[in-house]
Each structure stands twice: as C-alpha cells, then as structure tokens.
Image (cartoon, grey):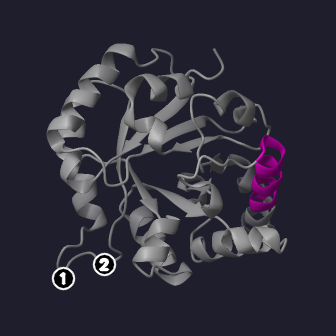
Amino acid sequence: MNRKYRKTVIAGNWKMNKTPTETKAFMTEFKTIMPRGRWCDVALCVPAVCIPAAVRTMRETRIGIGAENCNANASGAYTGEIAANMLLDAGCKYVILGHSERRQYFAETDETVNKKVLKVLAEGLKPIVCVGESLQQKQTNITNEVVCMQTKAALCGVSPAKVTDVVIAYEPIWAIGTGMTATATDANRTIAAIRAAIRELFGDAADQVRILYGGSMNDKNATELMSQPEIDGGLIGGASLVAEKFEKVINYHG
C-alpha cells in the first residue's frame, strides 16, 4: 500500500456470530495479545447486541468498534432497524454498508446503500462500503464495470471533504466464506480500477481513500495480499473470530 497517502485499516466482520458474553471474552483475550504499535487502524464490526460489550471492554484501547449495518432514516416506524445516531451514541466508529449478503438476502440496492452512506457520514461515522462481483460476472470479464458502478453509486452526493472518511472494501462475492481468494495481482488490479473510478469523481482525493480487500483474507494470505501497492488493508471474516488469527493478520508484516 501507499503509506505516503493512506494508513492501513484491518477490520473484522463478525457477521451473525458471538453472544455479548462471548464478545466480552474475545475482547478481553484480544487486549492481551493485540499489537502495541499504531501503524494501522484496527476495527471490529460486531452484531448490534454485542456493541455495548465490545465498547465497554475496549474502551481503553485504540480498537474502533463498528456495526454491520444501519438504517438510512434518523428515526421512525422501522421496527427492528437501528439508526446511525444510535450507533454513534453507543460508541461505534465504523459501519459496514452494502455487504453482498445484505444485497442478496435483504434486497439492498445501490440506491439504498448510497442513502445509508450519506446518513452515516452526516452523523460522523466512517462507512465501510462493500463492492464485489459474482462468479458469473467474473467469468464474463465485467468485474471492473460492476465494482466501479457500485462504487460510484455509493458515493453519489458525497462531498469532496467527506469522501476521505469513506472506506471501500472490495469483496468478490465468489470468494466470501468459500476459502477461495482472488490472486494478489488480480485483487490489486481491481482495486486500482476502483481508485480510478473514485478519481473520476473526486480527483486527487482518491489517493487518500482507503480500499481494502475482503473475501477470505486470513492469517495465511495477508502478507501476500498486503504487499500489493493498491491494497490498503483487509475486511476480515472468519479469521476475525479467533483472537490469535486476527492478531496475525494485523501483524502480517512482522
């Protein structure tokens, strides 16, 4: 990655795993082994019910706690939903938006993701916006078109002053939870295309936008992936559920 412009981000996405009690146990263990250096930003995005336990346990650390989704509305008759200002008040710093699982199972679209991005930024949180292609799209060689369209749609209406608060996570859908991973070269090439799309909209500010790779990044392949100049970090799934594995991803360079 280019540390002249960008600081690495290693973010965990727990998905629907761990209870609040298990969260406290994980955080307590992780505090004892987490790297002491500040060379990168570290975030753990956890289920909504686990946020208070995570925030309380990590209060004296530099770990940022995040949510896995939020609603685009400030309040109202949206039973079961959580607003961005609620997450901010609960102690969150990050919110994952537009994950492919939510697009697939909960009918999220580029339009709804964009509305959430704008609301999250307005509340002072940092969105981690997921983009990625399906296996069919990959096989028909339209990966760049798909992820660049998703990126531009997500950033529609974002001000130049706010775009550097956005984190993009490239997660090829075919690699999520499958054990398959894009080659380091392919991931770097796609992320370069995403950055070029951001540059079309925001000029040189694109050099400051951090773009992560997800899709089965773990303690075994992090070093190879992170050696690429365009990859600014990782959105980590399964490996973030095990404290020792997550620590190894963060310390990939050591």
Counting from the top left corner in percent of width and height, residue 47 is at 28, 53
Q: Is residue 75 visible?
A: yes
Q: Tell me, for residue 73, which label it has, or none.
A: 2
Residue 251 placement (x, y as % from top left): 56, 21
Quarter of the image containing the N terminus? top right
The one nearer the camera, 39 or 69, is: 69
Q: Amino acid at mark 2?
A: Asn
Is 61 drawn above or below residue 143 in the view shown? above
Q: Indicate left or right for 206 with 252 as reference.
A: right
Q: Label 1 sits on what residue type? A: Gly
- The residue under label 1 is 76
Q: Is residue 58 visible?
A: no
Which label was assigned to residue 112?
A: none
The residue positioned 60% from the left and 53% from the top of the image is 164
| Proximity of marks 1 and 2: CB atoms separated by less than 8 Å | yes
Main SS category, magenta section? helix
Residue 89 at what x, y percent from top left?
21, 53
Choose between 10 and 174: the one closer to the eye. Answer: 174
Give the SS element for disc 1. loop
Residue 187 within the magenta-colored segment of the rendering: yes
Q: In the image, residue 29 lies at what x, y percent?
A: 28, 21
- Residues drawn in magenta: 183-195
Give SS at disc 2.
Answer: loop
